[in-house]
Image: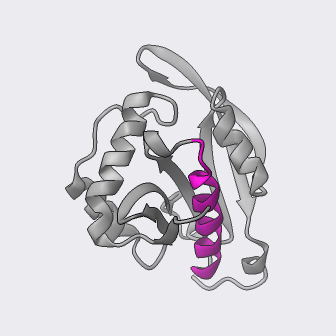
Amino acid sequence: MDGIQIRTASLDDAAAIAEIYNQGIEDRVATFETELRSAEDQLAWLRSIAGRYPAVVAQIDGQIVGWAGAGPYRVRECYQGIGEFSMYVRRDWRGRGVGDLLVAALISEAERLGLWKLLSRIFTFNEVSRALCRKHGFREVGVYEKHARLDGRWLDVVIVERLISANLNFVSL
């Protein structure tokens, strides 16, 4: 896509990441989260994953229009090479290929950082995200039924995973 730069997220991106994440929270199509995030919340998150888990942003004309990032899957040492990821695109940029670029960059950055797997949970009705994940080699491995409630409704989620084969033979934690 012309004009869009994908780069590693920096601490200076925290406010834009919070703004885009808050749109996702408000739209109720991608997260069970209901409390809006502050720039300080996202700054703390970026600091907590720095150097260990990937975070990337899409930027056009100096404006952040989307982000993707991963964090720890579980705290046990044996799972430290698995990143649980999220991806959000600003409302006015959805459906324009930004998510495609972000997921590709996230996978590349996860490989560079030595992760051997990325995974996520997607609302079963979020066909766009499910299709995007399939396009990038994620497989659907199951469904958590009635995983949590959002606005009083039980929702199911599809579990997706993608192995990063380059890192399966040698892993140093």
Identified at 50% across, 69% down, the residue is: 5
Residue farthest to the top, as pictured: 152
**Between 42 and 60, the one nearer to me in the picture:** 60
Identified at 72% across, 79% down, the residue is: 167
Callout count: 0
Q: Residue 163: where, in percent of width, then height?
A: 75, 64
| 129 shown above or below 14 | above
Q: Residue 166: where, in percent of width, then height?
A: 76, 79
| 165 shown above or below 73 | below
- Quadrant of residue 170 in the image? bottom right
Q: Is residue 54 visible?
A: no
Is residue 23 part of the magenta span, yes or no?
no
Q: Is residue 157 visible?
A: yes
Q: Residue 21: where, in percent of width, then height?
A: 38, 45
- Magenta range: 95-113
- Quadrant of residue 50 in the image? bottom left
